[in-house]
Amino acid sequence: MNISLYGISIWILPIIVAITFHEAAHAYVAWRFGDDTALQLGRVSFNPLKHIDPFGTILLPGMLLFSGSPFLFGYAKPVPVDFRNLKPLRAGMVMVALAGPATNIALALAAGLAFHLMPLVPADGARWVASNLINAFSFNILLAVFNMLPIPPLDGGRVAVGLLPAILARPLARLEPWGMLILIGFLIVLPLAGSQFGLNLDFVSGLLRATTDSLKQLLLLLTGNT
């Protein structure tokens, strides 16, 4: 277990900011499209305490970090949205879902652009600031890509439900109660089962890695960091 307080300090801020802004964006866009459920609960806020889930925001990333996992992930308390209040309904659903990942991409762009300000950072703090920016850049991209998987209740699933014709959207929406179990099956159970027979069934993680890497290269280019 090769972890230190320094190692924790360069991850905790990027994770909390990424997750907080992601959920606040969902809440704000839901309010703008007519549903004030999240607003009434104080979720249209950049206060991390409004969004932090003790397990998903702190314990889960911490366990992954301490275990040396190559895949770092976390989540916040889901923003409650009464989709019946959204006007127009389908467009509102799509925009609310897109708000979180779009905000993470904006944060990744901001982190990439902030690299150009590194000469202004005092030498004593340069390594710490640079590490935070690198981790913010990577984590925000991963969070955006993961959430755009087309499986409810992930944002990509809700975008798909909002865009697909009703004949396809309804059965996809019905998967929402089982969505996290499906993800666990694809990300953990299926690869483990495949490894028992010498088969590589880790195609969802492979897709996530490939998409994340491609998006990183694009954002590095856009921010002048190539």
Image (cartoon, grey):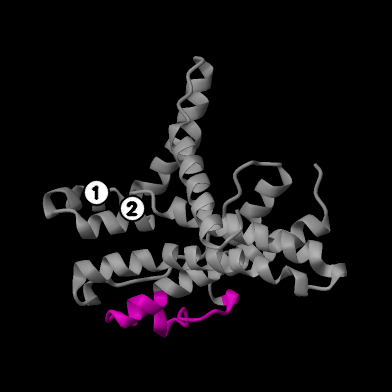
- Crowding around mark 2 (Cα neighbors within 10 Å: few <14, some 14 to 19, many 20+) is many
Q: Residue at x 38, y 55 (%)?
A: 154
> Mark 2 highlights which residue?
152
Q: Which residues are magenta?
A: 27-49
Q: Secondary structure at mark 2?
A: loop
Furthest toward the right, the residue is 124
Q: Secondary structure at mark 1?
A: helix
Q: Residue at x 28, y 65 (%)?
A: 94
Q: Sequence-wise, which precedes: disc 2 or disc 1?
A: 2
> Mark 1 highlights which residue?
172
Residue 159 falls in which quadrant of the image? bottom left
Q: Are marks 2 and 1 in contact (CB under 8 Å)?
A: yes
Q: Residue at x 18, y 53 (%)?
A: 164
Residue 79, image x, y percentages: 42, 70
- Looking at the picture, which amino acid does disc 1 mark? Leu
Quadrant (top left/top right/bottom left/bottom right) for the N terminus: top right
